[in-house]
Amino acid sequence: MFHHENVCYSTREHGLRECGSNEATEMKLSVVVPVFNEESALPITLARIEPVLNGTSWDWELILIDDGSRDKSLPIMIDRAAADERLKIISFSRNFGHQAAITAGLDFASGDAVIIMDADLQDPPELIPQMLALHESGYDVVSPQRTSREGEGFFKRWTAACFYWLLRKGVDERVPPEVGDFRLLGRNVVDVLRQCREHQRFMRGLVAWVGFREAIVPFQRQPRAAGETKYPLLKMLRFAWTAITSFSALPLRLSIVVGMTSSGLAFLYFCWALYAALILKRTVQGWTSLVALQSLSVGIILLSLGLIGEYIANIYEESKQRPLYVVRTLTNLNRGNHFSIHSGIE
């Protein structure tokens, strides 16, 4: 990176950056927080994050992304940003989704390291010093891993466990279980992720795909500070489907297995139909061939077409090359510093 006219490089030790002029400056941390209808949790979250950041040896910026909130989240953020220029706001023109909001934060982040966390305090800010220490020791990615999920029912915990199992077994075994988007990413990781502009985004899979050195930090996940979850069951299922189809052709391969299984069962049923027609003589003329053909083909064809259609729809969306998000306003940020491949910034 460049600092004024002198070439600079990061030492990671004691949060310092060394420059060609032998000048040592503070390393900078960017904290990216997507926000969607979090007016009740946001004041509590900011009150907990800022003291933790002030207690580190790093310079910092806090980037809040308003993902089309319909409550008072944006006015709260603007009031806080007016009193501290280190609080920066990206306001979307509408709701583009959690993964797009994270992408926008990475596009604007100027820090030597970036931490992604949610606004509901289920990601405890108190872990930040430990994450920075591991980064300074040489890790490019630091991923807090949930050891418990307080405030969540059995069904939510069970479906989460199934999701991570399927993801590791069928998509990418490098995706660590019970690790969400709460992560520290080094500048080298952020620069690579910025180049990945697909619309069907699954940031956890992208972080695993880039393959940098990763440290795991166990922690107990707390209940939401306030408000309601933004991921009900249907949205979680949609998110899981995006994760699988974005990184694997597994559903298409499964259609082959389903087709072979259906064909085997259909063959057995066909044998029974022949037995009923030739031996028992209980069938209506034409019934045997009709049942056999329908059993063999209709279900397999519809399933396969549906899976192929899903992938074609993803190709169609990617071919448009539309921006991943559209920014309506910026606060305490410079548009000129924005990473601008297929983005909604002019």
Image (tube, helix red, strand yellow):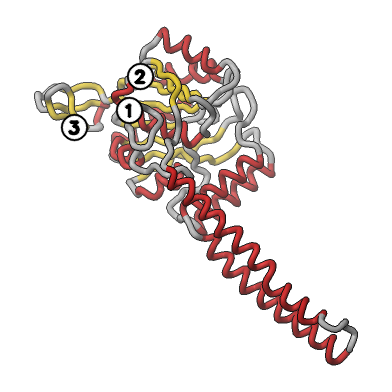
Instruction: Report helix, strand or loop for mark 1.
Output: loop
Instruction: Note whether 307 is above or below 145 in the view shown.
Output: below
Q: Are marks 2 and 3 in contact (CB under 8 Å)?
A: no
- Residue 333's label in the rendered image is 2
| Residue 310 position within the rendered picture, expressed as x and y whole percent measured from the top left | 56, 54
In the image shown, does 143 or 240 lie closer to the viewer? 240
Residue 235, by quadrant, is top right
The residue labelled by disc 1 is 338
Q: Quadrant of the C terminus?
A: top left
The residue labelled by disc 3 is 9
- Residue 45's label in the rendered image is none
Residue at the image point whose x is 79% and y is 83% from the top: 272
Q: Are marks 3 and 1 in contact (CB under 8 Å)?
A: no
**Residue 227 is at least partly visible in this image:** yes
Q: CA distance from mark 2 to mark 3?
A: 24 Å
Three-letter residue code for mark 1? His
